[in-house]
Image (tube, grey):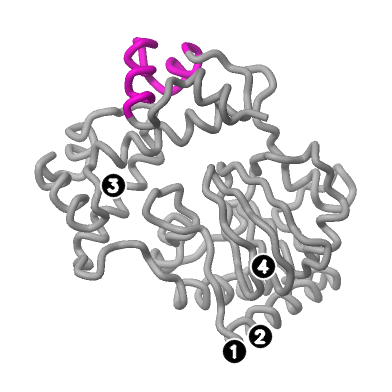
Amino acid sequence: MQKSIPIITIEQLNSCDKNILMKLDIRRLEDHVKTLSSADFPHRHDFFNLIYIKQGSGTHDIDFKRFIVEPKQMFFMNDGQVHEWYLSADTVGYTLFFKKEFYEVIEKGLSLQALPFFNNSHNDAPMVVFSEEDSQRIENLFEEIITEFKANLPHRDTLIKSLLKMILIHSIRVYEPLYKDDSTELNVSKIRSFELLIEKHFKEYKSVKDFADKLNITPNYLNAICTKTVGRTAGELIRDRIVLEAKRLLLHSSISVCEMAYHLGYDDCSYFIRVFKKEVGSTPEQFRLINRP
């Protein structure tokens, strides 16, 4: 694949000796922005990323969704998303990078997969906005992490992991899900499991039945809970993820449409083009021509 979306690694970002492999890095956002150039955007990461805005304005594009940057806001990026930002010169905050293997917790509800703001899901926003009181707590935790990171004392990673966990707990407490108000806990749990399966198998499986079988439920039941909980059918959620990946490749790589179709699990290029046009309203080539700089 030529001219693919650049992937920035955590080793490229940290300032230690290049022969030392690190699973974590943190820096003040205003310092980090100074080290970047327009050539660095848009890009993917091979790590998870928290971006906290203490002050400033601008826009932040994450997987073709634009968010307005505002103070006391936190963005959550997983290790596959494509993003690009335009920040005002007075932007101040923190950015923390960590590898998936750095963050390991016993509590299933706090695993990276279980935290909705790290999802690629159409139903979850990758950001939260904190109150004045909560934002002060979050800022204090970031300052503690910076202090620990620089000090490099024994058990540094263990303590930083605990502080990161506290940040994520405070974040999930104020996170506002996009599910409908009358959604039951059971339905939400099933949708979460479905979304995780989509993320893992969207290149392999295309039918609702494939995923329903994995969940040990019927396709009709899966469709019913999707429609009731998020207002979209199971098939639409599957296609949402496929189209998202196609858009990433169309705008940020030079791969041909048919190569892309095979990469996404379609043996028939023409069929893939029809699926894309039905979902987006234009052919893949038209989408690339209209939206690519």
State the separation of the CA atoms marked 1 and 2.
5 Å
Give residue 175's position: percent from left, percent from top: 45, 71
Task: Check the picture and name the quadrant holding the N terminus.
Answer: top right
Verify CB contact (< 8 Å) between mark 1 and mark 2.
Answer: yes
What residue is shown at x 28% (from left), y 39% (from top)?
236
**Bounds of the magenta span?**
258-278
Q: Can you identify the residue that label 4 sits on?
A: 52
Q: Which residue is mark 1?
A: 133
Residue type, label 2: Gln
Choose the circle earlier in sequence order: 2 or 3: 2
Residue that appears at 46% across and 76% down: 174
12 or 267: nearer the eye?
267
The residue that label 3 is drawn on is 194
Badge number at residue 136: 2
Per the image, label 3 sits on a secondary structure element best described as helix
Earlier residue among tags 1 and 4: 4
